Amino acid sequence: MRNIKLTIEYDGSRYQGWTRLGKNESNNTISNKILEVLKKMTGEPLIELNCGCRTEVGVHAYAQIANFKTESDMALNDIKHYLNRYLPMDIAITAVEEVSERFHAQLNAQSKTYIYRMTIDDVPSVFDRKYTYHCYRIPDKKAMQQAAALLTGRHDFRNFSSAKKSKSTEREIYDIQIYGDTEEMQIMIHADDFLHNMARFLVGILMDIGFGTRKKEDIEDIFSGIQQPGEPCDPKGLYLQDISY
């Protein structure tokens, strides 16, 4: 039995996230599109696909990691070409590797990094509108950086998430960086893991603080449950950038 690792790039605009389970289960997911092609390629109907990070509805990925096990003896380069031939054009397999039997894309992940992209202008770009969040004025980067310092470290992020059930809601944020210029700003969040919609809620509160609708002191009140985090950011500007192993 071979264990195959995939590096995947995708435009999440028209999908219901990496996977959609439960009451709102959907076949229109990234994982389902890949599984359909894998089953056709291998002739194995019960193949399973594990991912490093389950991205939500509308979120993109520069480098999602997944793995599957197969009896197929197809060459790695042929697997890559087959997948890219039959997958939709908004999903691309950028690398294929054979890894040890014990490798698991989710269980072995050590950290994950998200990037949020914001463009700034008085007229939104018709070309960037699907892949960045548009701001009509420049957010206060210094205020956002001060707020980011309050979010780093190990905390209970249950109030920055829409997770209904989780064994533990503690996560550690290693770093949050906010950088850019007068045309585009980016927020980078590097953490050991993310709860459901956690990245979107964190970006949302940082943007609220950057635009002056909230204060950095509100963060402690959100952790304690005195205040609500507000609305999560628009997913179209959010990208899974990296998963470390």
Image (tube, rainbow, N blue to C red):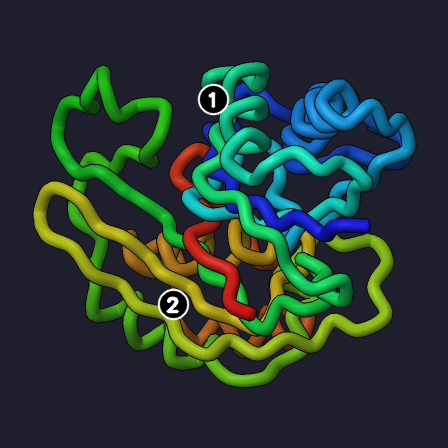
Q: Secondary structure at mark 1?
A: loop
What kind of residue is marked 1? Asp
Mark 1 crowd level (few <14, some 14–19, many ≥20, 10 Å Cα): few
* Left-right relation of 20 to 17: right
- Residue 194 vertical placement versus 185 (above, below): below
Q: Label 2 amino acid?
A: Lys
Question: Quick one: label 1 or label 2, which is nearer the N terminus?
Answer: 1
Q: Which picture quadrant has residue 105? A: bottom right
Image coords of residue 199 (percent x, y): 53, 56
- In this view, 216 is above or below 162: below
The vertical placement of 90 against 227, above or below, is above
Apparent side of residue 208 relative to residue 25 in the rendered image (left or right):
left
- For disc 2, the marked residue is 215
Establish if 169 lies above or below 149.
above
Tell me the SS state at disc 2.
loop
Q: Nearer the viewer, residue 103 or 204?
A: 103
Give residue 90's mark.
1
Q: Where is residue 132 shown, x and y percent of the image? A: 32, 34
Residue placed furthest toward the bottom: 153
Q: Residues within 10 Å of mark 2 (few under 14, many from 20)?
A: some
**In the displayed image of the protein, which residue is found farthest to the left?**
182
Task: Say which residue appears at 50% left-offset and 25% top-offset.
Answer: 81
Q: Is 198 situated left or right of 216 in this image?
A: right
Q: Residue at x 64, y 59 (%)?
A: 99
12 and 37: which one is in front?
37
Can you see residue 208? yes
The answer to the question of whether label 1 and label 2 lie on touching residues, with beta carbons closer than 8 A, is no
Q: Is residue 235 visible?
A: no
- x, y percent for residue 117: 31, 44
